[in-house]
Image (tube, helix red, strand yellow):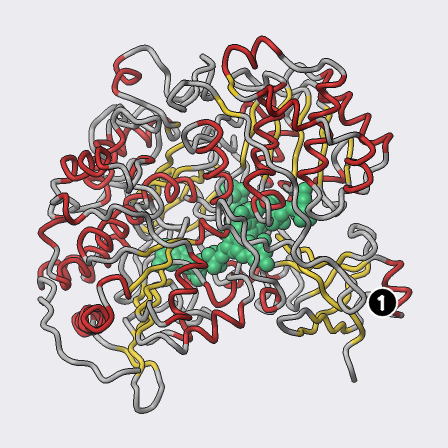
Amino acid sequence: MTEQTKVPASAPSDSLLRRWTGPQTSDLVLSPGRFGLGRVPLRLEPDATTGMVCGFCATGCGLQVHLRDGEALNLSGDPDYPVNLGMACPKGWEALAPLRSPDRAVTPLLRNPATGQMEPVSWVRALDEFTVRMKTVQAAHGPHSIAFLSTGQICTEEMALLGMLFKFGMGGLHGDSNTRQCMATAHVAYKQSLGFDAPPYTYADFEQSDVLVFVGANPCIAHPILWQRVLRNPHRPEILVLDPRRTETAMNATQHLALRPKSDLTLLYGIAAALVARGAVDRDFVEAYTTGFDGFEAFLGAFTPERACSESGITREAFDRAVDTIARGRRVSFWWTMGVNQGHESTRTAQALIDLALMTGSFGRPGTGANSITGQCNAMGSRLYSNVTSLPAGRDFRNAEHRAEVSRLLGIPGDRIPDEPSLAYDQILEGIEKGDIRGLWVIATNTAHSWIEQDRFRRLVGKLDFLVVQDLYASTDTARLAHLVLPAAGWGEKDGTLINSERRIGLVKRVLRAPGEALADFHIFRLVAEAWGCGGLFREWTDPEAAFGILQRLSRGTPCDIAGIRGYRHLDECGGIQWPFPETAAAGTSDPVRERRLFEDGRFFTPDGRARFLYEEPRGVPEPADAEYPFILLTGRGTSAQWHTNTRTEKSAVLRSLYPAEVYCEIHPDDAARLRVETGTRLRIRSRRASIEAQAFVTPTVQPGQVFLPMHYVEVNRLTRSTFDPHSRQPSYKHCAVHVGRAAG
Ligand SMILES: Nc1nc2c(c(=O)[nH]1)N[C@H]1C(S)=C(S)[C@@H](COP(=O)(O)OP(=O)(O)OC[C@H]3O[C@@H](n4cnc5c(=O)[nH]c(N)nc54)[C@H](O)[C@@H]3O)O[C@H]1N2
Ligand SMILES: Nc1nc2c(c(=O)[nH]1)N[C@H]1C(S)=C(S)[C@@H](COP(=O)(O)OP(=O)(O)OC[C@H]3O[C@@H](n4cnc5c(=O)[nH]c(N)nc54)[C@H](O)[C@@H]3O)O[C@H]1N2
Ligand code: SF4
Ligand SMILES: [Mo]
């Protein structure tokens, strides 16, 4: 830590502080339900029930929170919400427990350089420290020597304010979020192929398909309520699962293609080639709405069934059956998640799925689509509004016209808007390595656990002059490394909106008081703006609903136009509203509750209105298994009761009882027999980066030569390898080589 020179910072106004840290009443006028209330603003009845969306995954279930004396008592699935129809998974049911945990951060904490201990400080002191030290770093190393890493797990209004504060107010340039770990591939793939980051589907498509193809997705565990929607499908659908593991989802499929890890691209091109060969291309659709098919068709010539099968390890019989099923399907939908997005050639793999949907005319009709399922509750919000890789509403930092629009719509001087996008997450860490970035602000993500090749991040933290972590808990692996911890209010303690996987904007409400002096992220950002001295730029951002109005203004005329939404109350009454919802929709007959999909008219968002076929020769994996490291390590979600780095889910006794406390490693019985280990044996798992111990869990759900570790245990990312897709810069978490043996002793 360097000695600090004092740079004057303006103190946050006392009245703001009093308002946000004092006795809190909701900024939002809560209503006890959606229906039958008319437009009369209603103060929440102390013992009422109110609806809001879940804050874990991007399914975006509606929950009914039951209040006593104005505070949440418990909750249940909302039977009227169009997403979940009354259902909820264990995390949803237990969503209040993490908020009530005794280890919540209740005051700002500052590390005492003399003792190395974290000590409680006032907000005034914390904000002073924040501004002085960040400005000191900037003064010494340039304005771009500070950076932030944020999240897909705070409200859209909050992430938008953060991105604008940091870039337009604080003079910073580089900020990215954990959405890079998760959705960057889908974002880039859609943008390049369809002209906008626009997942086309609506959840009704799960029920309307006659063929559903899941690639690298395990919804039984990761999106259980979406799987319930699949189970409601009345068409006796064929369900194909492409996953190296025989997951819960694969077990429930009609066809499981247990392909070799990261052989997807070759296999998907092989399927496309076989569809061409049997004349299963929808030539009318291709002709009318796409461009580049001829080149694609020629490219596919090299992907014979023999090649596809030998490289992916699929039998010819299984391959032919899959091709036949897709060719015969009338309403075919392709769904993908992290098995695709996290890979060394992930953007092209996602685009191979888009190509398959385009060539079979599976777009814009019920039960079709190339559909990326989102992960975090608001990853979609961060893709559209976080001001990270693109300007709000999908605009481009490099486009002078877009910058001028944003400047005009926000009343921000044009010269404050950067003309280049941020560095990506891994490049920000590179910047720390090189000494270019010295100050880091981490908001609602737990990098020290979740980032790939974790030991490197932990080493890099030592190079930072100033690390600020803004979280619900001071006990997270990243918060423990911080110089300053800012205590945040969580889901349920603040108001705002989240955008789910089917583009539905849902409402979050304050139904509990945040403990101690913890503040909503929105208000923390406002305080930082005041303290920094740029509060004047954000005068209009008085509260989340006002911010929502600003985002609506920014969205007008773009593909994600939401200008027609009449405030939070409208969202509350409708059970969420999918984008787009322009003013014309609001004025016309369109029913916002209706499930809506994109591209029904075959017009895409590219300049010529046509979707593009994009493809590239597959490349080998960067770290294949070899004699020294003979196993391939797969990672992913373990149980529906664990959420990521487990900071929230570990707080619930109910959830804790649903998963093993210690890290376990799934290994095939043949490998286990050869290594003479059984379930419960301690294993040592070694990669070129690090070595960890885990309990063996012997199961045929993994293939011989592969092992699986759930990402929820902190050790796991010590093993993974820094490999990134070149287009999306998303980490390839699901492939590296390891050695597995009995642990000594
Ligand atoms: N309970 C729970 N639910 C969650 C989360 C959570 O932490 N816990 N996280 C949420 C988030 S942010 C996300 S992004 C989603 C993730 O949701 P999913 O992507 O469905 O979950 P994962 O288990 O990460 O990965 C899915 C599957 O990819 C497979 N896979 C690995 N390598 C390959 C490959 O090369 N090819 C193919 N085809 N498949 C492969 C894995 O075996 C795994 O079964 O879940 C969301 N829901
Ligand atoms: N090996 C491996 N690693 C992976 C993956 C994998 O499949 N395999 N998946 C990757 C994926 S898809 C993802 S999305 C990432 C997730 O990785 P992370 O984002 O690091 O995981 P979380 O545990 O969700 O961390 C969120 C943090 O925000 C805090 N928090 C929650 N709500 C709020 C809030 O309202 N305000 C504030 N300020 N803080 C809040 C929580 O306490 C927690 O510390 O992990 C990635 N890492
Ligand atoms: S499926 Fe996702 S949104 Fe629904 S209750 Fe579970 S965690 Fe919440
Ligand atoms: Mo994710």
In this rendered view, identify the residue nearer to me: 372 or 277. 277
Label 1 secondary element:
loop
Q: Which residue bears the numbered disc 1? A: 678
Left or right, residue 113 beside residue 412: right
**502 versus 222 height, above or below:** above
Relative placement, left or right, of 695 versus 151 is right
- Nearer to me, 59 or 329: 329
Q: Position of residue 492 (x, y in %)?
A: 36, 50
Q: Quadrant of residue 682?
A: bottom right
Seen in the picture, residue 633 relative to 437 is either above or below; the reply is above
Which quarter of the figure has residue 478?
bottom left
Tell me residue 672's x, y (percent). Answer: 86, 64
Q: Amino acid at mark 1?
A: Glu
Which quadrant is home to the C terminus?
Answer: bottom right
Q: How many marks?
A: 1
**Residue at x-position 52% and y-position 30%:** 85
Question: Considering depth in this image, is 510 or 637 the residue closer to the camera?
Answer: 637
Q: Give the farthest residue toward the top.
A: 284
